[in-house]
Image: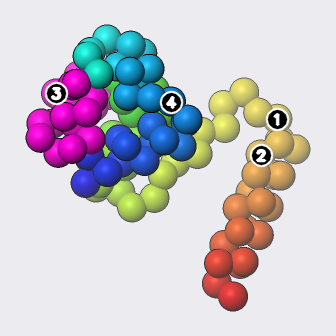
Amino acid sequence: MIAERIKELREQRGITQTELAKKIGITRSGVNAWEMGISMPSTQYVVELAQFFGVSTDYLLGVEKTAALYVDGLGEKDILLLYQMIEHLKAKHQE
């Protein structure tokens, strides 16, 4: 599960394995091994990845099925707009 989540989150950010590796201080082959499921990130890197992607460690590890959306630094109007957009998308996918 973590392999898929790392790859999915990285691709959503639009960054390469090399760019992710540089951000967290490992090699590109290390990131590739995680995404291929060949190896698992250590606890330290699970925390760093979660912080970098703005998700919980539980989400990254597959314990939670939903991602958290951190709204730090946003005003009330922006938060309300995001909430409305999420509700709109949920309704659209239920059709």
Label 3: how many residues lie within 10 Å, few (<14), some (14-19) or many (20+)?
few
Which badge, 3 or 4, comes first in the chain's sequence?
4
Please name the residue that numbered disc 1 is placed on.
Answer: 75
Instruction: Specify the label residue 42 is tagged with.
Output: 3
Task: Work out how far the residue at label 2 is from the one at label 3, CA to CA, in angstroms.
Answer: 34 Å
Magenta part of the protein: which range? Answer: 29-47
Q: Amino acid at mark 2?
A: Ile
Specify whether residue 81 is in view. yes
Q: How far is mark 2 from mark 1, CA to CA?
A: 6 Å
Q: Are marks 2 and 1 in contact (CB under 8 Å)?
A: yes
Where does residue 48 sit, x and y in percent of width and height?
A: 35, 24
Residue type at the position of mark 1: Gly
Tell me the quadrant of the picture where the N terminus can be found.
Answer: bottom left
Q: Mark 4 = which residue?
A: 15
Give the label, 3 or 1, closer to the camera. Answer: 3
Which image quarter holds the C terminus? bottom right
Rounded to the nearest angstrom, the CA distance separating label 3 from label 4 is 21 Å
Which callout, 4 or 1, points at the residue further toward the start of the chain?
Answer: 4
Residue designated by label 2: 79
Q: Amino acid at mark 3?
A: Ser
Q: Is residue 36 magenta?
A: yes
Mark 2 Cα-neighbour bin, 10 Å: few <14, some 14–19, many ≥20: some
Lower sequence index among marks 2 and 4 = 4
The image position of residue 21, as x and y in percent, is 35, 19
Residue mark closest to the camera, 2 vs 3: 3
